[in-house]
Structures are given as structure tokens and as C-alpha cells.
Amino acid sequence: MFKLTFPGKPSFQKIFIAVFFLTFANSFLVASEFEIKYLLVQNSNQENSKKISSNLKAISRYASLEFYSIEAENFESQNSIPSSYTGIILTSEFTQTNCLTEKITTFLNNGGIVFIALPFKNSSFFERFGISINPSNTTNINSQGLISDNRFLRNIRIQLPQETFGATSLDLKFSDDWKILIRYLFPSLQPLLITREFGKGAIVYWNSDCLRLRDFRGYFLFSLLSAQKIGAMSIFNSTLFQIDDSPPPSYGIESVFPILGEPVDDQKFFLTEWYQEVLDLLSLRGIKPTHFLCFRYSGQKTEDFFKDSDRNPFFKKILDLIEARGNEIGLHGYNHIPLISKKPFQDEKKNQKFMKRSLESAKKLWKTYDLPVPKVYVPPNNQIDSFGKAMLREIFPSIREICGSYSGFFEQGNPSEMCDEIGPEKNDASCFNIPRFSRGYFPDHSTTFSIMNGVLGHGLINHFIQPDEVFDPKRGKNLPWELLLQGLENLLSFFEKLLPDSKKFYTGDFLIPLKNFLQDEVHFYIIDQNHLKIVSKTIGRNWFYIFSKNKPLTISGGKIYPTDFSPNFFHIQIFEKAAIISFVKN
């Protein structure tokens, strides 16, 4: 934490302090402001430590945090933790040594924050902070599922795939000082995320190495910022909505389930029910959907590509309906086969030729249907590789945004993890990634978990649905259309609660504000623990989340909004390049 130190003996100090405050009385806010700094303790030779560190650096670029990395071995050799750091983040098991316990305890007692992102290893290290383990069960296992009793996290109860959490310590015992935010659902109700105050400081402990995954980035950042006396992050404050496979595939299905009490075939249903009701609902909420069309769903893999869609005249009728609404149309491919060099043929050269021919066929059909120039592409199955991206840019040079699933951890060259960070492609700065956080018709636990991760990490909702899910018993939950539509309406209401003042964009129109946001520079300064100063270079970032132990009282150059999250969580809009927020004790 920030401290003023003065040289000399006590008598000299009094004179020095008097002169100091007389000299700087009119500019004290400037003299005492400081930025929040964290020391990130990592082990570059340990895979999980590397991934956790990378994940944190990626998400924190929007927040009131500066990170300085240090290797665990070097950190261990230091006599103390410098008081200039607000907190330290431990991602390496090498930091769980007895010689570090005293340094960390002193740091906490002086008001520092310690963030621990690793499984339990060293009993004596953790016992100092009120955590013990059953010595007969010290095995790290892969847990499945989580549950939250915390209102902020919307009481999430979700089953997640095995391996999601990585190594996890079970049979841990916690003192009453700890507050549990998230617990494991299975195989035992052990805490996953817990916090506690310690001395003048605080500890945040993730009982897992799951933070290597992007699925937890928003929760990761929230748990760190909310542990501070004052924390802040800039957010996109935008809502995007996408409709995949639209126009939808027509299976020729009849009487799959009763809609409004009568059997109906899929073509008639889409034309008379689905599109009318869904687009009306979105329009009522001011949400601008982008439709991603695919010309064929037949799985055609030969090069004698058809010259037209396999669903006319139904396909054309849906396109006319979409265009009459003024909705945006993006590309989902010619034949719903991912643009990756290893599929569908074993011969890479043959497959590259296939990819090019399929995209050329899509372009011809695009002109045949006289569609607006596409700006956005969604890869089928979220898969695309470097060659596929090159072909896409060559044949559809107007496409500048690629939207894929935001999950897992990105590995260069792994086509199944297509979408990296929000922002420009690593190998082509003219093309941008805009990941999609969630899908479906319901604000169920799984969907809520994903949406919250996107909102907490970026202040952005990018959700998608698929029309034909209605005819899929698993994805549509075998529910009648009336209940699915009501579920979608509830989901849109949930969006409004999370981002009540968000701007609604067609996906292709999001590129300009995205560029402005990423090109802007924002700095956050803490002033004598009662004020927060936000300085923006261009006002490209003008929406923020503020975390505070105290209630914000006033703001110069901006406006404060309460949120539905927590009494310690606020929504801020600034109108000038600099704004100062004043806080008062609750």
C-alpha cells in the first residue's frame, strides 16, 4: 500500500511535513495518488503456472492492475515483500515453503492482498492462514460440478465435464474466518473459491488450478478486484446477439411435437412462428441479431458443388424475411464443414483445394442472392486453422470479424480452440476476434455461468441461438415452443439486469467501438483510500465497473449507477477524459 516516508530525526520530520503540506496543499490529490501494482509469482517451467499467469495477464488489461512478474526462486530469496505492491499472486507450488510464510504474514498484516491460485500442498504454509487437511486424504483429484450460495454469482449450480477443474485438494478444513463463494458440487461439497480478511489485508484462495482456463477468467478477475478496498475495470458494456444456421436447415420434419396444440412441419413453423416471434421479441428489447447463413447442410464433400441452396424456395423466403427486418447477415460457410486442413480429407493439399472451391461457391451464391457484403464469419463447429483463415480473407476480403466459442485455453495451431482474445488476430491485425460466451434459450445454470464469466471479465454479452434446436429433443429440452419462447424472454430480461445501459450492436458494427476501446489507454489512481481517479486518453473507454468496500458518494465528470449484483459493485459512466470518484464509509 502507498506510504509517505520522510528523512531525518523526529524534529526535522515535523518541519519537513509542515513544509510539505503547505507547499502541496492545493495539489494533495496529485501528490498522494498511486496505481495498484501486483507481484505475479510464477514458475516458467511449470505448465499450469504458465497458463494461469498468461490467463491473468490477458484479462487484467482492462483493470486497475499492473503486474510485475517474478520467478518463484527469485521471490523466495527476497527478505520481504515491498510495501509498494498492493498484492501478490502465487501460481507456483514452489511458493509454499516455510521461509515464505513469515514474509506473507507480515505483508497481509500491513494491508496487502495475497491471491493463491493452486492446489493445497504444504500443510504448515496453509495452517498459518486457517486451512488444514485430513492427513489420511491428501490426494488431488479432478472434481466435477460447482455450486454457489452467493447472490452475486446467481446461486449457480452446474455440472461441468470431468477435468474442468484440474488438480483439486479435497478434505480441507477452514476456520470460520473464511467466506465461501463457490463450492464443488461433486464428489464433495469442498470450497472452490474462498476469501478472508487477515490483519489489515485479505486472502483469496482458489482451491484448484482451473484458472488456466478462460471459462473462469471473469470470476478470476472479480475475486481479485473485489478483495481490494477499491478496484476498477473498464468494460465494453455492449450486447451482441447471433442466430446460427439461419436460414435454418430444413429436415422435412412433420409432427415432431405439437406447437400451439397442433402438429406442424419445420418449414411452416419457421416461416409462420419462429422468425416472426423471435425477431419481434428481439426488436422489442432493442437487440440487433446477426444471422449466419450456410448454403448447404448435406455434408457435400465432392467438388461438383451445387449451384444453388438445397432448401429453395424455403431458403429464399427466410432470407427475404430477414432482409425485410433490416437484420445483418454474416457467413457460416458453404457446406457447414470447418475450414481446417486435416478434414474432411487425409490429403492436406486436396483438402486445401476443397476449402477454396467451397468458399468460391459460397461467394457465387452470395452474389446470386444479392446479399449485402458480409463483415462477419462464424466457423462451423468453431474450427478454423491458419490456411482456412487465409482462404477466407482471400475470397471474402470484406470479412473483418471472426466469432467462435470462448472456452478452454488457447493453443496456437489447435483448430478446436479457434477464438483467442477479444481483439486483432495474432497473424493478421486487420482481422478481429469477437468470442461468443454463451448459447441457448434459457438462463439455466450452465448458460448463466458462461454469461457471467463474459460480463465479469469484459462487460460484454455475446450470445447465440439456433432455430433448429427447437426440433432437437436434447438441445430443445423436449419442451413446447411456447415455453422455449418464454425462456428466451427470461434470458433477455437477465441481459438487461446484468448490463442495463448496454449498447446493442449488429456484430459487424461492433468493430469500430471495439477498435476505439482497444486503442484507448486508461489509468486508475487511488487517492488517499477515499478517492479513485480515472484518466482516459480518448474516451474510447467510458464505462466501468467499480468495486469498493465503501459507497461512492460523488463523481466529477461522470455518473454512478447501482447494479443488481452487490452493494459493493457499481456501474460508472464518464463523460470527460478525467473523473474523480469520492467514497464514504458505509
Image (cartoon, helix red, strand yellow):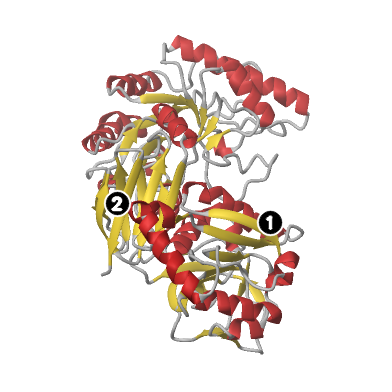
Residue 197 sits in which quadrant? Answer: bottom left
- Residue at 59% in and 86% down: 127
Regarding mark 2 in the picture, which secondary structure is present there?
helix
The one nearer the camera, 36 or 287, is 36
- Measured from the top left, where is residue 402 in percent x and y? 53, 31
Front residue of 424 and 170 = 424
Q: Is residue 506 above or below residue 369?
A: below
Q: Which residue is mark 2?
A: 494
**Label 2, label 1: how many angstroms apart (C-alpha)?**
35 Å
Work out whether mark 2 precedes mark 1 in sequence or the reverse, and give the earlier one: 1
- Quadrant into which the C terminus falls: bottom left
Residue 246: image tag:
none
Q: Is residue 59 above or below residue 220?
A: above
The answer to which of 552 and 400 lies nearer the viewer is: 552
- Do we see residue 540 in this rendering? yes
501 left or right of 332 in image? left
Q: In the picture provided, is 496 more to the left or to the right than 233?
A: left
Residue at (43%, 67%) from the top-left corner? 15
Residue 389 location (% of width, % of height):
62, 27
Q: Is residue 495 visible?
A: no
Residue position marked by numbered label 1 in the rendering: 50
Q: Position of residue 129 (x, y in %)?
A: 55, 82
